[in-house]
Image: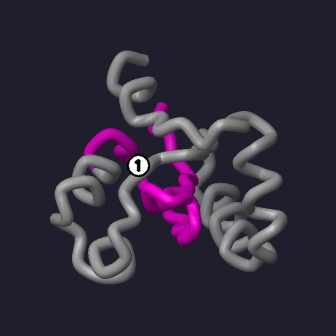
């Protein structure tokens, strides 16, 4: 079954946040990290994966991404800290997992 990922990236200072959706999290984060994706993440050096969620239904994933994008900054920080209090880069975790 296909999976969909809603994710949050930040910069090295944890001051800028980007929420996205993909069906291939490893590939998409790789693109962000290597500045292969034009736009916001490239412009603001947003390439550290700090949060992700897995969905089997694309509609639910899209709804969740939109909800995260509409969260206040403090709520995004609370969401990240709920599973990643130190704002660790989770990229290595998804590579090995």
How packed mark 1 is, by other alpha carbons closer than 10 Å (few <14, some 14-19, many 20 or more), is some
Q: Quadrant of residue 36?
A: bottom left
Q: Is residue 88 magenta?
A: no
Residue pointed to by mark 1: 23
| Magenta region, residue range | 1-27
For residue 41, side relative to residue 90 (left or right): left
Q: Is residue 24 above or below residue 96?
A: below
Kindly tell me whether residue 55 is visible in this rendering: no
Where is residue 72 shown, x and y percent of the image?
A: 80, 76
Query: Which residue appears at 78% of the width and 73% of the height?
Result: 71
Where is residue 89 shown, x and y percent of the image?
A: 47, 39
Query: Which residue appears at 26% of the width and 54% of the height?
Result: 33
Of 4 and 86, nearer the camera is 86
At numbered mark 1, what does the secondary structure look like: helix, strand or loop? loop
Name the residue furthest front: 13
For residue 22, side relative to residue 16 (left or right): left
Q: Quadrant of residue 93?
A: top left
């Amino acid at each position: 079954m296909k999976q969909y990922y809603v994710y949050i990236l930040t910069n090295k200072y944890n001051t800028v946040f980007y929420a996205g959706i993909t069906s291939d999290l490893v590939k998409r984060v790789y693109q962000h990290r290597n500045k292969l994706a034009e736009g916001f993440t490239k412009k603001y050096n947003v390439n550290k994966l700090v949060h992700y969620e897995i969905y089997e239904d694309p509609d639910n994933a899209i709804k969740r991404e939109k909800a995260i994008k509409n969260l206040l900054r403090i709520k995004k920080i609370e969401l990240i800290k709920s599973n990643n209090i130190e704002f660790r880069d989770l990229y290595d975790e998804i590579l090995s997992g």
